[in-house]
Amino acid sequence: MNRSKTQAARFEQLLAPHMNTLYKTAWRLVGKADEAEDLVQQVLEKIYPQTKKLETIEQLGPWLKKVVYREFVDNYRKRVRRPENYPAEKEDALENLRESEDNPETLVLRAENRQRVLRALDRLDGDNRALVVMHLAEGYTLAELAEIFQIPAETVKTRLRRARARLKKNLLA
């Protein structure tokens, strides 16, 4: 087996246990399935040449999430600089989630609430959106977020409190 096949096999072996988590993290950050897939693909393309380095990382999961977050931030900054290349309309990112068999009125109310939450999240800047989503939806602890964002835990706590306040204000608007 040549070197590139060995590297590809090792890369796949290292990343396979983390793919679902990477996709969910990307999806929570960008809010769209196709964009989440693109984000994960970008990350995989960037880290593939570093397969040997990946083998030395003790906690690969948090490291990979940090890479996904950084790629998300880079993409966000590029999009802000070139908004004409990014579609303005928002699709329902939660439409593919399994709905329970409730009455039609309940389903409509849930859909409306999801739309309100997504609109409120969309009004947050990229860092605040990522922080709120990763903490509230993904369940990351303050320590884990401090590691991912590479800032002190107290700073995470402060930013999270401010982001929640903005989210609440957006929901009430």
Image (spheres, rainbow, N blue to C red):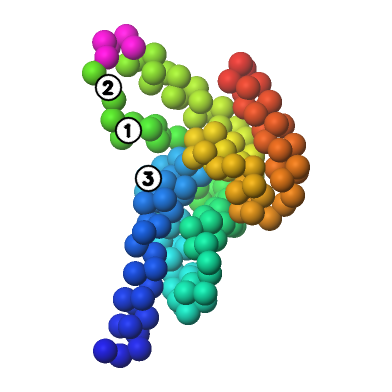
Residue 96: x and y in percent read 31, 35
Q: Residue at x 39, y 64 (%)?
A: 15
Is residue 16 left or right of 30 when viewed as pictured? left
Q: Secondary structure at mark 3?
A: helix
Residue designated by label 1 = 97
Q: Residues within 10 Å of mark 1 (few under 14, many from 20)?
A: few
Is residue 146 left or right of 49 when viewed as pictured? right
Residue depth check, mark 3 versus mark 1: number of the one nearer the observer:
1
Q: Residue at x 68, y 55 (%)?
A: 150
Q: Residue at x 56, y 57 (%)?
A: 66
Residue 13 higher or lower than 128, as above or below: below
Q: Residue at x 75, y 43 (%)?
A: 155
Disc 2 versus disc 1: distance between alpha carbons?
A: 10 Å
Q: Which residues are magenta?
A: 102-106
Q: Residues within 10 Å of mark 3 (few under 14, many from 20)?
A: some
Residue designated by label 3 = 33
